[in-house]
Image (tube, grey):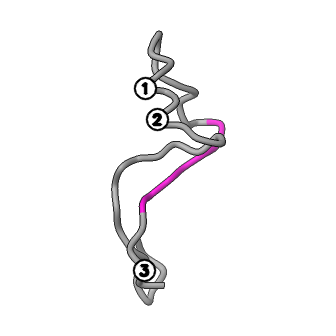
Amino acid sequence: MGEVGEFVDCGPLVMKGYWDQPQATEVAIRDGWLRTGEVGFMDENGWF
């Protein structure tokens, strides 16, 4: 808690990749997780 890190997401509603851009997809999605490039932290109440 309180540690700064990158937001990553996965699930059935997350995009599978960029249309006709395999290199961009490789950068953004690794091991099934979408790397958002956004950073943040969880506070003491569990909010991000």
Q: Which mark is residue 45?
A: none
Residue type at numbered disc 1:
Ala
Q: Is residue 17 above or below residue 1?
A: above
Q: Is residue 40 left or right of residue 1?
A: left
Which residue appears at 46% of the width and 35% of the height? 27
Q: In the picture, residue 44 is in which quadrant? A: bottom left
State the image coordinates of residue 7 (x, y, percent, origin top left): 44, 58
- Dot 1 surroundings within 10 Å: few (below 14), some, or many (20 or more)? few
| Marks 1 and 3 close (CB-CB < 8 Å) | no
State the image coordinates of residue 4 (x, y, percent, origin top left): 38, 74
Q: Is residue 14 above or below residue 40?
A: above
Distance, label 1 to label 3, CA atoms, is: 28 Å
Q: Indicate whether residue 24 is drawn in magenta.
A: no
Which residue is tagged 1? Answer: 24
Q: Secondary structure at mark 2?
A: helix
Q: Which mark is residue 3?
A: 3
Residue type at numbered disc 3:
Glu
> Which region of the structure is painted magenta?
6-12
Q: Nearer the viewer, residue 36 or 30?
A: 30
| Marks 1 and 2 close (CB-CB < 8 Å) | yes
Q: Nearer the viewer, residue 47 or 40?
A: 40
Closer to the N terminus: mark 1 or mark 3?
3
| Tally of numbered tags | 3
| Marks 3 and 2 close (CB-CB < 8 Å) | no
Label 3 or label 2, whichever lies nearer to me, is 2
Q: Is residue 4 above or below residue 17?
A: below
